[in-house]
Each structure stands twice: as structure tokens, then as C-alpha cells.
Amino acid sequence: MRSTLVSNNKFSKLNITPKLLLGAGPSNPNPEVLEAMTQPVVGHLDPTFLGIMDDVHEMLKFAFQTSNPMTLPLSGTGTAGMESCILNVVEPGDTVLGIENGYFGHRMIEVAKRSRANIIPLAFEWGKPVELEVIEEALKNNPSINVVLAVHAETSTGVLNPIKDIADLAHKYDSLIVADTVTSLGGVDLQIDNWNIDLSYSVTQKCLGCPPGLAPVTANQASIEKIERRSVPPNTWYYDLLLLQKTYWGATQRTYHHTAPITMIYGLREGLRLLVEEGIEERIQKHTDNCNTLRKGLEIMGLEMLVPEGNNVSSLTTVKIPEKINDQQLRSSLLTNHNIEISAGLGTLSGQVWRIGLMGENSKRENVFRFLEALEIELKAQGMNVSAKEAINQLG
Ligand SMILES: Cc1ncc(COP(=O)(O)O)c(C=O)c1O
């Protein structure tokens, strides 16, 4: 006998209350992106769709500031991009330097361990920038290192790592670099070619103003040559970059690799189109300005930043939770009473900081003010006397 669902009205039509997503991601997609995603679904080898793929390819290169022919959106989230880049370029017998000053640097190391290479983890205090002299020392002392892993914008701490300098060091010691650009692509200055970054992955759900589901990846000639020299194929078929490029994204005669998530690609095309329309420098400046407004506003209200100005990520601000304030209660009342989401601290920073994202579509002055006003109400509810009005007046 077939099983039945007894209650007809248990599953009503979805009706989600909109929230302002000011956490570590996803951020709110641009309305135009959501609209693009309602366009009719066509086949993944339909000429219309192939044209859309060409557009995405061209605009993604612009977003990454690269001319790498191998630049494509993987089907999957940022971690799929991480696994794909690392498991393609690292093979058994390699020596990998994994730089960690936060949760995602740590995750890169964990992923690399699955490649059966020799992994040298190099940990710095979370919330502090990495020290270039220590990285250089590690490279000097371990000449077999041939791949370096590093995060550009560490979302767990809000620290912006000097990825160009790390890339320079990696190359000085004959190594390739894999850079996590998840929280920087489309919002923070990132120049793949000028900075000589060999391989990089990102996401759609942060500064590109799209929902989660795709992982843009770019790989230069040096990294492709290393992948081509592998003695064994990477331990992944779905995320085999050379195969994907050969059959689908880079091919003149595209053939089936897997069924592309059509609707997601429509959304990404629109997110990228909006970036092109706005201009990359304007987008970067907007993120910097709104981040500075948020930081100043919070400081006027008496809160303290985790990361000093200059080392901070402009799309993600980490602020210390004031003493005697209940972290969980505050975040949950922001969500219930104001429909605003912010993120908790991750890993060792759990319970110590809040992470406030102003990414892509959400990087707006009015969102900063809406958040400060809601924060005032909820901090006051827990007995802390603060004034958002005063902060907003001072910010002008
Ligand atoms: C820096 C960084 N790397 C990797 C990831 C993993 O991405 P995803 O959660 O989309 O798999 C995240 C997610 O927030 C991130 O912030």
C-alpha cells in the first residue's frame, strides 16, 4: 500500500517573510536577479543558453579581473569551489602550506588533507592579520612546498589578508597559490591577473547579489599545467576542472557534462550585468564607504571593533559583543522584532563577536541606519544605554 499524507492543510503554499540579511551570507539578492531567475527554463544545450554561458564567462572574467580562459561557475556552493580547486591542483606527493587565521583557512587545510599530500599548517591568531615574515620563513625552511593556500577576506574574523603579498612570496619560492575570494569577489578590490593569483574560487551569495548555489572559479595557465602534469586524475569527477572545461564551459562544441542549473546561471548573469553597469571601482568604493559608516556608528554607540581599520574586510564587520549582553537573545530579537539577521561568531570567536555583512545589494547607507536603530532598541532591552539617533546625527 502507498503511504498517504493524512492532513491536507499541513503543507501550505510557501510564504516567507522577507528579512534583511546582514549576516555573513547569504545576502539579499538584487530584485533584478530574482526577476531574471523567473525567466523560462530552456535546455542546457539550447543555443539561447549557450549564449548566456558566453556572457557569464566574459563578465565573470571582468569580476575576477582576469583574462584566464578557464573561468567558470561550478554548480555548488563556495565549499565546492574550495574542494575543486584544491583537489585538482594538489596531488599525492605535493607539499602544501596552509595558512590559517580563521575558520575558512582551517577548512582549506582540512580539504587539502583529503588529497594525500603533505600538509604544513601555519596558524596565526584568529582576528589578527597573517605575518608575512613568518610565511616567508616557512617557505624558506620547506623548499618542497609547491602549493600555498590562503583566504583573502576571512569571513569568520573580518580580517583582510594581504593576498597579493602572499602570492608574491609563494612565487618567490616556486609555489602556486590557491586563494579563497568568497567574501571579496564583486565587493572588495581583487585583481587576479595583476596580483598573479593562480587559482581562486568564490560564491554568488555575497557581494555578487545572487542566491547561493554557484561557485565561480578561475585558473591560470600555470595551475592548468600543474593539473595536466598530474600522475593520477583528481579524486573527483564532477569537479574535475579540465573535464568541465573540455566538455562544457570552454568547448567550442559543448557536450553534456552535467545538467547546468539553468535558473541559477540566469541569476548570476544578471548579478554580473549589474556589476558591469555599476563599475567595479564604484562597487568597491561603495562597500568601503558603507563599512566605514557602520564602524563609526557602532563606535559612537560605544561598541568596539575586533579588527582595526586598514586590516578589515569592507563587506564584513566583526564587532565585539558588549559585556553582560546575551548574544543569542540579541540576535534572535533582531530577527523576530526587526526581521534583521546578523551572524554569530564562528569557532574560537563564538560568543565573542557579531558578524555584520554589508554585501552587494545590501551595502547601503539606509541599511546601516536601519540596523543601528534596531540594535539600539535591543541593546536597551538588555539594559545597555546607547543612542543610535546620536550616532546617525553625527554621521550626517
Ligand atoms: C571565506 C569563505 N570561504 C568558504 C566559504 C564556504 O562557502 P559555502 O558556505 O557557500 O560553501 C565561506 C562561506 O561563508 C566563506 O566565507
Image (cartoon, grey):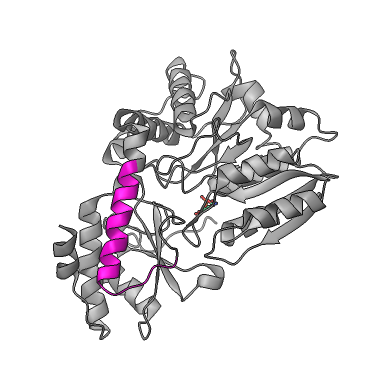
Q: Which residues are magenta?
A: 285-306
Q: Residue at 59% of width from left, 13% of height from top?
A: 252
- Taking 75 as reference, is 25 above or below it? below
Question: Considering depth in this image, is 264 or 86 the residue closer to the camera?
Answer: 86
Q: Is residue 343 left or right of residue 35?
A: right
Q: Residue at 49% of width from left, 43% of height from top?
A: 203
Q: Residue at 44% of width from left, 41% of height from top?
A: 189
Residue 301 painted magenta: yes
Q: Position of residue 80 (x, y in %)?
A: 59, 45
- For the question of whether residue 390 can be seen, the reply is yes
Q: Position of residue 374 (x, y in %)?
A: 22, 68
Residue 58 painted magenta: no
Q: Position of residue 17 (x, y in %)?
A: 26, 58
Where does the C terminus fall, quadrant-wise? bottom left
Q: Is residue 269 left or right of residue 289?
A: right
Q: Is residue 59 left or right of residue 199?
A: left
Q: Main secondary structure of the magenta part?
A: helix
Q: Position of residue 179 (x, y in %)?
A: 60, 44
Where does the N terminus fall, quadrant-wise? bottom right
Residue most toward the top? 252
